[in-house]
Image: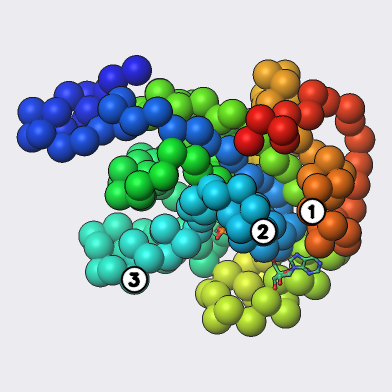
Amino acid sequence: MATVSDAANKENNESTLADRKVTVIFVLGGPGSGKGTQCANIVQHYGYTHLSAGDLLRAERDSGSENGTMIDNMIKEGKIVPSEVTIKLLERAILETNNDKFLIDGFPRNEENRAAFESVTGIEPRFVLFFDCSEEEMERRLLSRNQGRTDDNIETIKKRFKFGGLMLQSLLKKFLMRLRLVLSHLVKRLLPSCSTIHPRICDLKYRWSNI
Ligand SMILES: Nc1ncnc2c1ncn2[C@@H]1O[C@H](COP(=O)(O)OP(=O)(O)O)[C@@H](O)[C@H]1O
Ligand SMILES: O=c1ccn([C@@H]2O[C@H](COP(=O)(O)OP(=O)(O)O)[C@@H](O)[C@H]2O)c(=O)[nH]1
């Protein structure tokens, strides 16, 4: 589906997502559930390009952009950056990459993110990988992640759990209804290094062979 920005880009002879046929997998899970770690594994074995929404936002913040202060505040408060900002960064990253298969890590965070992405880019995910992990384990991992992040402190971690948990649950329900959700215990069969991800529920259509 072409968008207004697609039309503007066309006039400027820039390539747009409407010109590209891309496959997208959303990789979701709470903070510290292992999304980034497992994306690195998948990239190695399946030739996907890994796009972390959080990394794109941190790079934008550090670039001196006009949105830098807003992004910094949202991250420190564990809140969700407005969809249009994150989607623009994802769109740009896809267009700059010469691959047609993408793992989008940590996005969407909520239903509004999902709907906006679909409407702006016309892209529906092939499916969604969800890494399920207890808050206790996620907290332990985040506190020893040691990447110098401004949000890996106990106060912000609690906020990320509080704001993110419910939104993620209702988003997952949407994907579940569309039969697009693959849970961590299925991922675990393919990626033995996922062994500490704690498995729960479900017997859903398993489409790993398609990627
Ligand atoms: N299965 C695992 N068992 C133990 N520690 C893990 C596991 N997966 C990731 N970690 C560690 O937990 C921390 C958070 O993982 P990360 O992949 O950055 O999570 P996310 O991207 O979901 O926030 C990192 O320090 C990582 O090395
Ligand atoms: O689509 C996104 C992804 C990330 N974030 C912000 O970036 C922070 C860090 O996200 P990231 O995915 O890097 O880490 P995680 O919280 O999953 O460990 C989040 O708490 C949000 O404040 C956001 O607003 N929108």
**Residue assigned mark 1:** 191
Using a 10 Å C-alpha cutoff, classify the residue at mark 1 as few (fewer than 14 neighbours), some (14 to 19) or many (20 or more).
some
**Residue assigned mark 3:** 62
**Disc on the earlier residue, 2 or 1:** 2
What residue is rendered at 16% in x and 33% in y?
9
Viewer can see residue 165: no
Q: Which amino acid, mark 3?
A: Asp
Q: Quadrant of the N terminus?
A: top left
What residue is rendered at 69% in x and 41% in y?
129
**Residue assigned mark 2:** 41
**Disc on the earlier residue, 1 or 3:** 3
The image's mark for residue 15 is none
Q: CA distance from mark 2 to mark 3?
A: 27 Å
Q: Quadrant of residue 40?
A: bottom right
Q: Answer yes or no: disc 1 within 8 Å of ligand 1.
A: no
Q: Position of residue 174 (x, y in %)?
A: 67, 24
Q: Position of residue 102 (x, y in %)?
A: 50, 43
Above or below — where is 104 with respect to 20? Answer: below
What residue is rendered at 80% in x and 39% in y?
183
Using a 10 Å C-alpha cutoff, classify the residue at mark 2 as few (fewer than 14 neighbours), some (14 to 19) or many (20 or more).
some
Q: Position of residue 42 (x, y in %)?
A: 65, 52
Q: Position of residue 3 (x, y in %)?
A: 27, 23
Q: Which amino acid, mark 1?
A: Leu
Q: CA distance from mark 2 to mark 1?
A: 8 Å
Q: What secondary structure is found at the residue carrying circle 1? A: loop
Q: CA distance from mark 1 to mark 3?
A: 34 Å
